């Protein structure tokens, strides 16, 4: 039996990169996928077809998780279409890097809104359903820089550290209702966003990693699969570093 057979999953920001990798692995394991995207309708439709080829149900929603009302409406729409919400993966995120002395208030606020406030918005939106079901798994995408910090990423690091604190508090509040909440902290992962950095920069990162390679979306997707499935039924309130040993 597939690990997520019959489970209905929401994944935010799944049209590319890590989110897309998670959606693909989840669909291969039997999950029905509701995913959000913010821009390309064409990419979303293509992903719907790719996921549905696994025999599951898949539907994209053009929705901004950083908007409270939009998150609430998304949960309503997904319930109408899928009938339940078993897993929430809060993956949507952006970067607007810069030194603190040059960082604008707008760049700080926008990163906090998309990365952190969206986690609150979506968690709040799915809770009535999960509480009624008395089960659920919430997985928040953090980062190793939320654990150790990174020069030039004060806004991003702060947003990801906040996610870890939110995760632990959520786990403590909801454990008695059989709702689990965990974070994943990826290290350096090769996606469309990292291609612009150039091979020399990527090689520098490889050299810093004990496993001597950077991660792939599948590395993160497989860890997310574990936390979404019943294999992790006794795991909650944890931050799982998936970083090739960077934080060792």
Image (spheres, helix red, strand yellow):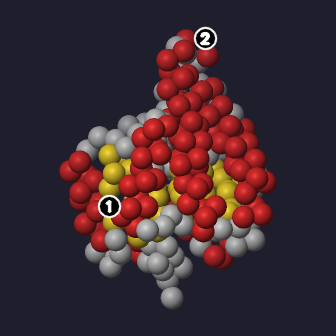
Residue 242, picture quadrant: bottom right
Depth check: give the residue in front, 209 or 236.
236
Query: Residue drawn 65% across and 53% down?
Result: 183
Is 196 left, or right, of 136 in this rendering? left
User: Closest to the observer: 111 or 137?
Assistant: 137
**Can you name the residue that lies furthest to the left here?**
42
Q: Which residue is mark 2?
A: 101
Residue 240, visible in the rendered structure: no
Residue 160 picture location, percent across and down: 63, 39
Q: Position of residue 141 (x, y in %)?
A: 58, 49
- Which secondary structure, mark 2? helix
Question: Which residue occupies the extreme bottom position in the image?
Answer: 1
Q: CA distance from mark 2 to mark 1?
A: 42 Å
The x, y position of residue 181, in whole percent, is: 67, 57
Per the rendering, the mark at residue 59 is 1
Q: Is residue 232 above or below residue 2?
A: above
Q: Which residue does the image show at 58% across and 47% down from the upper left? A: 124
Q: Is residue 55 left or right of residue 203?
A: left
């Amino acid at each position: 039996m597939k690990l997520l057979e019959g489970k209905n999953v929401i994944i935010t920001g799944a049209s590319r990169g890590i989110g897309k990798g998670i959606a693909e692995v989840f669909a291969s394991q039997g999950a029905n996928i509701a995913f959000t995207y913010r821009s390309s309708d064409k990419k979303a439709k293509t992903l719907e077809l790719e996921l549905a080829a696994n025999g599951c149900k898949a539907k994209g929603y053009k929705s901004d998780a950083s908007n409270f009302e939009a998150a609430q409406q998304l949960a309503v729409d997904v319930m109408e279409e899928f009938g339940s919400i078993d897993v929430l993966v809060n993956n949507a995120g952006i970067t607007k890097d810069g030194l603190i002395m040059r960082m604008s208030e707008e760049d700080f606020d926008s990163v906090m809104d998309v990365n952190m406030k969206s986690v609150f918005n979506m968690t709040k939106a799915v809770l009535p359903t999960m509480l009624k079901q008395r089960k659920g798994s919430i997985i928040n995408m953090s980062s190793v820089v939320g654990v150790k910090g990174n020069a030039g990423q004060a806004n991003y690091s702060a947003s990801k550290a906040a996610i870890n604190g939110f995760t632990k508090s959520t786990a403590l509040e909801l454990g008695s209702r059989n709702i689990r909440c965990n974070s994943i902290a990826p290290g350096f992962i090769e996606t469309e966003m990292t291609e612009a950095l150039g091979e020399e920069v990527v090689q520098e990162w490889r050299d810093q990693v004990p496993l001597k390679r950077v991660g792939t979306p599948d590395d993160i997707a497989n860890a997310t699969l574990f936390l979404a499935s019943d294999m992790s039924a006794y795991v909650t309130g944890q931050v799982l570093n998936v970083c090739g040993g960077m934080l060792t």
